[in-house]
Each structure stands twice: as C-alpha cells, then as structure tokens.
Amino acid sequence: MNNWQYARELPTAPLWRGQMTIPRQLQLDFNSFTKTYHLRQLPAHELYLYSKQLLTFHRRKLSSKSANMILNSSHDVYMLNTEFHNITKTTNIHIRVRQTIDKLEYTEIKYIGNKNQIEFDRSHSGNVKFDDSFFPQFNMSLDKETLTTGILKLQIIVDRCSIELFINGGKYTMTALIFPKYQGYQIELSIDGEDILLNYLELMLFSM
C-alpha cells in the first residue's frame, strides 16, 4: 500500500515505509450490469475473529435538513459497515472518519450521485504536503448497479495510518495511506439531496 513516486519520502521514514493491506479473499462472479465476470475482493473471514460489535443502527431516515449523525468510536482502529437505500442521481453522501473534535482533521469518503462516483478526500487528513505527487483527492466511477437498485454498500476499515474501502460487496475497492497529526475518534455522516434510508450501520472494533 504505497506509491513508488514518493515511497522514500513518507513521513514515517526512517522507522518504516508503507504497509500491506489487510488479507483479502477473492471471488469470481458474473456481473449482470456489465455482462462480464468480475473479481470481488473482501476482507478475509479470519479478520472477523478479532472484531467485536460496538454499536449498530437499522432503518434510519437520513435527511439533508436534519443534524449530521456523529458517532464516537473511542478507538482509532475499526470497521464501519453501511448500506444505504433510495439512492438517486441527486444523492450525495459524506462519511468522515478519524475526525477530531474541532473537525479540522478528518478523511472523507463521498458518494456523488450525479457522477455515480466514489470520491476519496484526504486533503484534511494530516500531513499531506510531504511530496507533490501525494494526491489528496481521487475518485472511482461505479457501474449502473447503485442507481438501478438504489442501494449502496460501503465497508470501511480504518487503521492508524490507512483506510481501505470495499464498495458494493467488494466489486470495487480503494485504499489510501494517511498521516494524521492528532487522534481523531469521531465518525460523521451527512447527506445532500433527497432523503435516503440508512438500512443499517455497524461499527466493529478490532482487538489484536
């Protein structure tokens, strides 16, 4: 989990440079939306042996007119499982992780409905200026499954200096290194656009 363009310039050097992603299991299945076979990636089953559920929500209406949902993980290593329903082209979802109390430091994962894209924004994640090729923002376009079914599944694994994202059952994945300056335990969820349904949210902690 590194980029050769700035591998020697990581802020953690010389103590260590880069790290591996969590172990993953691979599954080949047919994608009815793209009419091709697709390789899914998901966290290995064994990872769940070292996790415990901290809290869970079911079937909560989310509105842009309501106050943002703020959770306190009290830990900096955890897994967040979410499933959203009633997704449309007007939907924008914002999930901030490792957010400090003053909200000045955080990493944000966004779903932008009119682009049908996941955007990863680490521009406020801490040290982001150690190399010009360390891109604070990047994105990924999704196939039409989300807008056709109205369902978006996000599984986010947060570590002390990395975030791994699994989208729609591992059909898409994104990973990124982050270099926080402060401890941030808040998780903040907000939306723009029409009301949607948070079908479930599950926060799990790791103990290793």
Image (cartoon, rainbow, N blue to C red):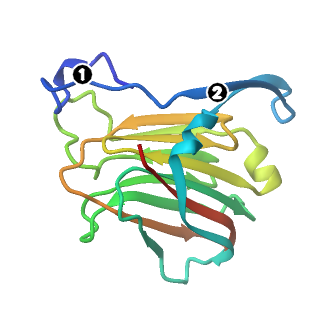
The residue nearer to you, when weighing 159 against 111, is: 159
Residue 91 is tagged as none
Mark number, residue 6: 1
Q: Are marks 2 and 1 in contact (CB under 8 Å)?
A: no
- Relative placement, left or right, of 38 versus 71 is right
- N-term mark: 2 or 1: 1
Give neighbour class at mark 1: few <14, some 14-19, many 20+ (Cα, 10 Å): few
Residue 69's place in the image compared with 147, above or below, is: below
> Residue 17's spot in the image, x, y percent?
24, 23
Left/right of residue 135 with respect to residue 90 in the rendered view: left
Q: Secondary structure at mark 2?
A: strand
| Amino acid type, label 2 | Gln
The part of the image, by quadrant, that contains residue 177 is top left
Residue highlighted by disc 2: 25
Task: Write the residue at 15% across / 26% down.
Answer: 15
Q: Nearer the viewer, mark 2 or mark 1?
A: 2
- Could you tell me how far apart the alpha carbons at marks 2 and 1 are, in whole angstroms? 29 Å
Expressed as whole percent of the image width and height from the top left, the position of residue 5 reads 28, 18
What's the residue type where badge 1 is placed? Tyr
Give the image quarter of residue 87.
bottom right
